[in-house]
Every structure is written in C-alpha cells, then in structure tokens.
Amino acid sequence: MTATVIDGKAFAAKVRGQVADHVARLKEAHGITPGLAVVLVGEDPASQVYVRSKGKMTVEVGMKSVEHKLDADTSEEDLLAVVKSLNEDPEIHGILVQLPLPGHLNEDLVINSIDPAKDVDGFHISNVGLLGTGQKSMVPCTPLGCLMMLRDHHGSLSGLNAVVIGRSNIVGKPMAQLLLGDSCTVTIAHSRTKDIQDVVRGADVVVAAVGRPEMVTGEWIKPGATVIDVGINRIDAPEKGEGKTRLVGDCHYDSCADVAGAITPVPGGVGPMTIACLLANTVTACCRANGLAEPEGLTA
C-alpha cells in the first residue's frame, strides 16, 4: 500500500483563500477589517522568521497586521502594558505573543493577560477550559489545522479510533479534545505508555506530536490508517555534506507511508496549516466581536 499524501501546503493555501474571501465580505458589507497583532520579545532567529511570515500572510489576505518588537530585557510590567493596550484597541481582534519568551518573563502570566476573545493562539486558561467542556472557544492553531485536514480526508470522523501521541498543552491535549468533539474514541499515548506500539497499532487515526524524530515506524501503523505527523525535528544529514541537516517528523515517513492509507509529509504537511489557522482564528474572533456569523469551515 502506498499512502495518499495529504498536502498541507495546498490545503493551507485553500484556507487562506477562504479567509481572504471572508475578509473582503467583512470590508464590503460592514466596513470592518480584521486586525492581528503579534508581540515579539527578543531576537530569537526562528521566532523572527515566523513573525515575518505571519505578518506577510496577514497582509496578503487583506487583514491589518501590527507588530510590536520588544528588547530581550523588556520588563514584565512593560510587556503586560503592551498586551493591555492591544486588549483595549477595537481595531485589533487577535493578539499573539510569540513564544518562547525570555527566561525572566512568566509565560503563563503573559498569556493569561490576553483578552480570551482575542487569544487567537487558544492558550488562555479560559479557552482551554471552554474547549475541554465542549463550549465555544478559540482553538489552538496546530490542532485546528490537523482537524481540518482529517475532516477533509475522511468526511465524518464519528466512531473512528484515534491515538494522539504526546500530551502537551499546545497540541496533544487540545487535539484529543477536538477529536472527542467529532465523536472519535480517543487515546492519549505518551512516554510512560506501556506497549505503546500495540496501542498505536489499533488506531484508525494517528496524530504524532511527541517531538522525537522518526519515533513512529510503519510497524506501529494499522494498514490503511491516517497518519498526521505534527513533529518538526532537525537531524544530521551527512549524505548532504558535512554539517548539513534535514527536517523530519515524529514518524519515519517511508515505512509509515508503505502501510498507512494517508499521511502528512514533513515538511509541507501540518506546518503550513498553523499560520493559516491563525488567520482563520483572527477572522472568527472579529466576527464574534461584532456579532456576525462565523466563517463556515474555518472553526472547530
């Protein structure tokens, strides 16, 4: 069996197109432009690249993009003051504080200072609680992207056995909640799970988000299962030359693709969906703030 490749780049482009269409309608019908603000503290190179990409795509879909770049030694008081000003700005509908923050800043305190209605990362404790109890919330972007791709591939997920490998607050736990919301039977596997290969082998849907390169091999996968690989790991690639590296997922792609029915590649799978869903969340937040119908197909 050769798995169908779930093309995250193409799917993300489709989502961004839907977002752009909805933004255009908001402008034309209501005179409203959704606004996304990103706060970057320090000069982490990966974060800088990510923030630039977010800003570029925000503008491309017709939304307002605001960036606040703060020095690495910015005090907690000053950072909280920036967040407060954005909470109070009616033209800003989504706020994202880029993580990780410098060590002297309390990430939980900062994230929970964001207005939950503008928390487009879905990390605020109120949104975590709302998602966990099946109520309307802002949903973390990466799990939302995974859910969109699974729905697109399967149609209904009802009754499927799903295993989420990883129990992080950012991916594993919210992913499990979303799959439960779509009536899957869900197991969360992790580093202490006994006979983890056997647990995974019973799954119709596998979401790997554990942060261990190529941990999941084809022997773990049920024939025909759908594999969503959230992992992004950089490993040595001596075949490319001395000091060269390559990106791999948490799944060994070739062996899993020989068994699975469908699989996301790394790169080009889940990654592009994260920013696309950030934009979708911003439009959703804008619609909710203005009492308007939410965009179809862009929410959980």
Image (spheres, grey):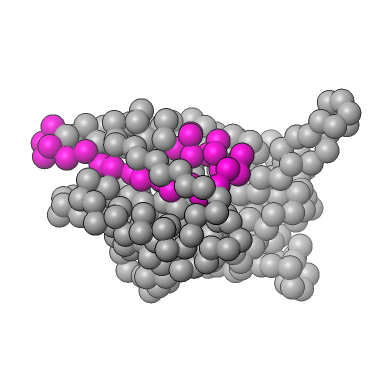
Q: Position of residue 169 (x, y in %)?
A: 54, 65
Residue 157 visible here: no
Residue drawn 29% across the image and 36% down it: 64
Image check: 66 left or right of 204? left
- For residue 201, what is the image quadrant? bottom right
Q: In the image shown, does 287 or 55 lie closer to the viewer?
A: 55
Q: In the image shown, does 130 or 78 lie closer to the viewer?
A: 78
Task: Identify whether 127 is placed above or below 26.
Answer: below
Residue drawn 38% across the image and 65% down it: 113
Q: Quadrant of the C terminus?
A: bottom left
Residue drawn 39% across the image and 61% down it: 80
Q: Position of residue 131 (x, y in %)?
A: 39, 67
Q: Position of residue 100 (x, y in %)?
A: 57, 54
Image check: 198 left or right of 292? right
Image check: 86 left or right of 235? left
Q: In the image shown, does 232 or 176 lie closer to the viewer?
A: 232
- For residue 172, what is the image quadrant? bottom right
- For residue 167, what is the image quadrant? bottom right
Q: In the image shown, does 52 or 3 lie closer to the viewer?
A: 52
The reply to whether the magenta stretch includes residue 53 is: yes
**Magenta range:** 28-54
